[in-house]
Amino acid sequence: MNVSATSLSLQLAAFRAQSFDALLGPSMDFGSIFQAASSSDASSAADKLAGLTGAGGLSSTGRNTSLFDPESAFNMMSVINQKQADYTAQYSELSDMKSEVSDIGSAAQALSSVAASSSNADVKDALQKFVDDYNAWVKRFDGDMQQGGVLAGTQAAQVARWELDQSVENRFYGVDDGLNGLGSIGITIDPKTKLASFDAAKLDSVLASNRKGVLDTVQEFSAHFSGAAKLLNSAGNFIPNQLNNLGSALQYISNNISSWRSEFGTGAPAVASSAQTAKALAAYRQAA
């Protein structure tokens, strides 16, 4: 999903090309107005918008009746209102995901404490705790990732889930000890639910026959998974980049929406597309 102040300006320009030729006339370059969003002078966009039409005031229904086509203008503002709500929900959920990725990375890092001095029970407990933490992470964002969910079209979220899933399923942990990844010691991922399962009996069996291999596998997994989580949250990577883009778009809308509403009408209020969206919006407003 391409989200930025610039991409929003281009979408608005495209909207104008479809709906506002009659409203503004061919001499009005609506696209250049919103291209100002990509410059450091964000106020220039608002200034140019203010000069497009006369200030006729809004009707009780939120339309600017001084415009040639008040309904098209109102509809455009409805789209902007919805984008503002959608971007806000995405920003809130992706911020939570960034925090949760860090937490699950720390949970994997904790497995580095598994060592030769650890009892078999300690190894089993440590792996069970990681599986529980991992499943909690998957369940937390599962609804968001489904079709129509808050993060369904967000590449950053999809990449994060895929990368961590692949890290669990990597078959090269413990290969030098004759093992083939976490599956060899009882941890597998269900291909449909993406939840991890833990076969403690299988772990006991491998501990009895190849204890060093188990410990090496756990250590290698700990380093790889925690490193992958840190990389996902590192500057310039998917999650931080998407948060920056969303933040920029939201700031651009916030800086200009009052003047847009004065000129083009209020637009219809945004509608939360799902319970997850409503929850994300509430969380964002509470944190603000």
Image (spheres, rainbow, N blue to C red):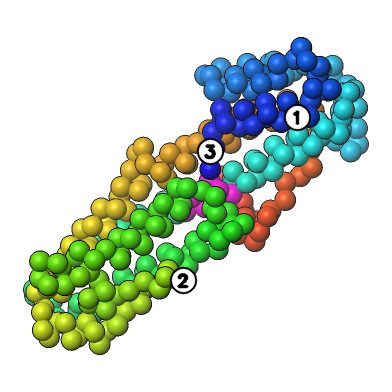
The kind of secondary structure element at disc 3 is loop
Q: Nearer the viewer, residue 24 or 121?
A: 24
Q: Residues within 10 Å of mark 2 (few under 14, many from 20)?
A: few
State if disc 3 and disc 1 touch (CB < 8 Å): no
262 w.r.t. 47: above or below: below
Tag in front: 1 or 2: 1
Q: Is residue 95 magenta?
A: yes
Q: Quadrant of residue 32?
A: top right
The kind of secondary structure element at disc 1 is helix
Residue 244, given in percent of the width and then of the height, sits at: 47, 37
Question: What separation in Å lies between label 3 and label 2 (alpha carbons)?
Answer: 28 Å
* Magenta segment main secondary structure: helix
Residue range corresponding to the magenta coloring? 89-96
The residue that appears at 39% across and 57% down in the rendered structure is 162
Residue 4, given in percent of the width and then of the height, sits at: 54, 33
Q: Which residue is mark 2?
A: 193
Q: Which residue is mark 1?
A: 18
Residue 101, given in percent of the width and then of the height, sits at: 38, 56
Question: What separation in Å lies between label 1 and label 3 (alpha carbons)?
Answer: 21 Å
Amino acid, disc 2: Thr
**How many callouts does the rendering have?**
3
Q: Nearer the viewer, residue 89 or 176?
A: 176
Q: Which mark is residue 2?
A: 3
122 w.r.t. 158: above or below: below
The residue that appears at 44% across and 65% down in the rendered structure is 138
The kind of secondary structure element at disc 2 is loop
Amino acid, disc 3: Asn
Q: Is residue 160 magenta?
A: no
Q: Earlier in the sequence, mark 1 or mark 2?
A: 1
Q: Residues within 10 Å of mark 3 (few under 14, many from 20)?
A: few
Question: What separation in Å lies between label 1 and label 2 (alpha carbons)?
Answer: 42 Å
Q: Quadrant of residue 20?
A: top right
